[in-house]
Image (cartoon, rainbow, N blue to C red):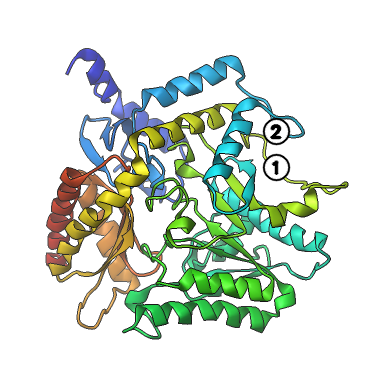
Amino acid sequence: MTSTETMAAGVGLDDAALQAKAKDHLWMHFARQSVMEDGSGVPIIVRGEGHRVWDIQGKEYIDGLAGLFTVNAGHGRKRLADAAARQAEQLAYFPIWSYAHPAAIELADRLASYAPGDLNRVFFTTGGGEAVETAFKLAKYYWKLRGKPTKHKVISRSIAYHGTTQGALALTGIPEMKAMFEPLTPGGFRVPNTNFYRAPEHGDDLEAFGQWAADRIAEMIEFEGPDTVAAVFLEPVQNAGGCFPPPPGYFQRVREICDEYDVLLVSDEVICAFGRIGQWFACDEYGYEPDMITCAKAMTSGYSPLGACIVSEKVYEPFKHGEASFPHGYTFGGHPVSTAVAMENLDIFEEEKLNERVRENSPLFRAELETLLDLPIVGDVRGAGYFFGIELVKDKATKETFNDEESERLLRGFLSRALFEAGLYCRADDRGDPVIQLSPPLTIGPTEFAQIREILHDVLTRAWAQL
């Protein structure tokens, strides 16, 4: 490497000094701070290019998670950095609180053109949790403006993750993420998810299971009272628990239920939008039209923070006339630099046909991963697009899962470190049953699919041997 390349790769940076500063001052997200105290330190990533990243020691890794389901166009896109710089030089910041700027206007128009049906109104945020919070608040306020103030409850699915703010956390269906923050915003209720591998009903009939799971939403609405339920929040493919795609007909039945009971349907596409499933919005892939879409992450491929809540004309209608306003917003929502980066990022998607690339290559990715089903530790491989989960089991015949102590030992004690040391950054997770999650940049192809499969095969074989 040249001296410039060496510095860019992190070689020459003072690892020990950075580790000491991190130990003394950095509070990481969703992480055990004890790794700072026990001397093992934290991996420090210094560079990214395409679908690969490098740590401070110069070691290379496949980014199997697109950062955090985010860097869909890949790392190191100079044109996105240039777009940010151009916008910052012209107008670095101005709010969209009763004012506007060209980048936010153009991006809102573009997102409306991608969204299905009459989802034409775009409320910008700075991230996904804020987009969900916005949809939650808007759903409650909408029904008040419609003269139905008792419609304030919201329904989501078991193990689903919708964010960590107080409102979004009320939607999140992962008890261990919520107990320490209770009491939460009231009104969140849970229904079964679409984990067909562990279907409690119709385990031999995917379509019948989908109808059963959808009907549980109607059952919950009836139980709570239709005059109290404002909205249903669902991811097209549920992330937490390990990539649960919808069974055939599931969302069509959910749409029917929401229409029957006069309940809004929110498609939470913070992960699934912008190519992850091979479409601008995954609701198009599964043939349903929601009342609102929440999105973020890959809108800018992570090059600048941005999220949005995209709203139908029906939901927007009470705000079109008179004195009604939505008293809600964020200082950096619709930030000029972020919206300019998003426009350039979406240009890349169109020019390089990234959505089409995912649709073409997804079967090849799935085929590579399904070879892992030969391993005794792999119970299920599921997902869609470039978004897959691999469920790990103790016994394939009975689908017996690991207890909490075993999961701790398997995931955090071995797999997370072993996968990273083998050159693959991904997620070994136990929100639900133990899974490995993959969500790489959309730039990868068959060569990388095979490399990912080889690493997983080796590490999972060693994991089984040490159980």
Q: Amino acid at mark 1?
A: Gly
| Image-quadrant location for residue 444 | top left
In the depicted structure, whether residue 378 falls above or below residue 36 = below
Report whether 338 appears left or right of 247. right
Residue bearing mark 2:
96
Q: Nearer the viewer, residue 284 or 226?
A: 284
Residue placed under numbered mark 1 in the picture:
329
Labels 1 & 2 near each other (Cβ < 8 A): yes
Residue 246 lies in quadrant: bottom left
Q: Nearer the viewer, mark 1 or mark 2?
A: 2
Residue 120 at what x, y percent from top left?
A: 63, 47
Secondary structure beneath label 1: loop
Q: Secondary structure at mark 2?
A: loop
Drawn side of residue 311 relative to residue 148, left or right:
left
Mark 2 crowdedness (10 Å alpha carbons): few <14, some 14-19, many ≥20 = many
Res. 218 visible in picture: yes
Q: Closer to the camera, 356 or 383? A: 356
- The image quadrant that residue 306 belongs to is top right
Q: Is residue 440 visible?
A: no
**Looking at the image, which residue is at 49% across and 66% down?**
174
Q: Looking at the image, is mark 1 or mark 2 earlier in the sequence?
A: 2
Q: Residue at x 26, y 58 (%)?
A: 413
Give residue 192's position: percent from left, percent from top: 48, 76
Q: Is residue 192 above or below residue 358?
A: below
- Expressed as whole percent of the image width and height from the top left, the position of residue 30 reads 45, 51
Q: Residue at x 57, y 53 (%)?
A: 293
Direction right: furthest residue: 322
Residue 119 pos. (x, y %)? 61, 51
Q: Identify the amino acid type marked 2.
A: Ile
